[in-house]
Image (tube, helix red, strand yellow):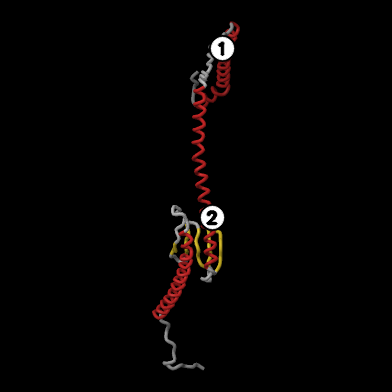
């Protein structure tokens, strides 16, 4: 039995414009939530920046290793220098202090408490300062080594001049060119070899000519006569 619904109870066809408006509203709500989370992360990182500032103020004035500041991106980060930074974990409450090395990114410290992160950053700053001092000392030694060598060579030259030691001149020995002496029998052997080579060449040419003539008389002449005509010779 077919049931018929009244006109006021029938469902209206779906509207694409209404669905698009609902999608825009949901996107705006999500973007607002994401923006709120991002602003909260930035505020937390700024607290760490304020806590580490007094430590950086104690560093020597000529040190330009550290430039602390918050980088505003999809995931805000507090950079301490070019290779270390602090960000927040997925819970948006735990601080993580990373360092980029040749072997990859290393997690130095992780804690929801700012004092522990600041302590780890302080230790990192101290290590970087010590590494800088060692690099400068190594550079000073490498630059002073040639100067010491120059002083030693100058002192040795001065002692040589005071002793009046004449410089030894290199001894050059001139060798007289050796004359080649060819004996009579060697020259005769060369002439005999040349004659043998010439005679052998003539014999080989004659043998080739005889072979060609015999082949002509045996096969060439009859074929020429049969297909072309009288042979030329």
Q: Within the image, what quadrant is residue 116 found in?
A: bottom right
Q: Between marks 1 and 2, how big is the CA–CA gap? A: 89 Å
Sooner in the amino-acid sequence: mark 1 or mark 2: 2
Q: Could you say which disc has been placed on residue 194 in the image? A: 1
State whether residue 89 is above or below residue 132: below
**Which residue extends farthest left?**
17
Q: Which residue is mark 2?
A: 127
State whether residue 106 is above or below residue 174: below
Q: Quick one: label 1, few (<14), some, or many (20+) residues within 10 Å? A: few
Q: Could you say which disc has been placed on residue 180 in the image? A: none
Q: Within the image, what quadrant is residue 24 found in?
A: bottom left
- Callout 2: helix, strand or loop? helix
* Residue at image location 45% in from the left, 75% down from the top: 33
User: 112 or 104: nearer the eye?
Assistant: 112
User: How far across and how far down the image is residue 97, in percent?
Assistant: 53, 62
User: How far across and how far down the image is residue 7, in percent?
Assistant: 42, 92
* Residue at image location 48% in from the left, 20% down from the top: 232
| Mark 1 or 2, closer to the camera | 2
User: How far across and how far down the image is residue 162, in percent?
Assistant: 50, 23
User: 205 or 138: nearer the eye?
Assistant: 138
* Residue at image location 44% in from the left, 62% down from the top: 69
User: 189 or 179: nearer the eye?
Assistant: 179
User: 177 or 153: nearer the eye?
Assistant: 153
- Callout 1: helix, strand or loop? helix
User: How far across and how far down the image is residue 153, in percent?
Assistant: 51, 30
Q: Quick one: label 2, few (<14), some, or many (20+) residues within 10 Å? A: few
């Amino acid at each position: 039995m077919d049931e018929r619904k009244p006109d006021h109870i029938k469902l209206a066809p779906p509207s694409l414009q209404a669905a698009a408006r609902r999608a825009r509203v949901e996107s705006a709500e999500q973007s607002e939530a994401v923006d709120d989370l991002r602003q909260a992360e930035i505020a937390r990182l700024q607290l760490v920046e304020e806590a580490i500032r007094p430590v950086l103020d104690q560093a020597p004035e000529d040190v330009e290793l550290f430039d602390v500041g918050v980088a505003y991106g999809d995931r805000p980060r507090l950079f301490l220098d070019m290779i270390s930074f602090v960000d927040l974990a997925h819970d948006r409450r735990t601080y993580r202090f990373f360092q980029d090395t040749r072997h990859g990114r290393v997690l130095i410290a992780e804690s929801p408490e700012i004092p522990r992160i600041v302590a780890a950053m302080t230790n990192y700053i101290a290590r970087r300062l010590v590494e800088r001092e060692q690099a400068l000392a190594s550079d000073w030694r490498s630059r002073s080594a040639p100067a010491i060598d120059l002083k030693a060579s100058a002192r040795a030259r001065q002692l040589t001049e005071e002793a009046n030691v004449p410089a030894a001149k290199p001894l050059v020995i001139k060798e007289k060119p050796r004359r080649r002496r060819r004996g009579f029998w060697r020259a005769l052997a060369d002439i005999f070899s040349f004659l043998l080579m010439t005679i052998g060449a003539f014999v080989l040419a004659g043998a080739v000519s005889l072979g060609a003539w015999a082949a002509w008389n045996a096969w060439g002449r009859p074929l020429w006569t049969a297909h072309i005509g009288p042979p030329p010779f």
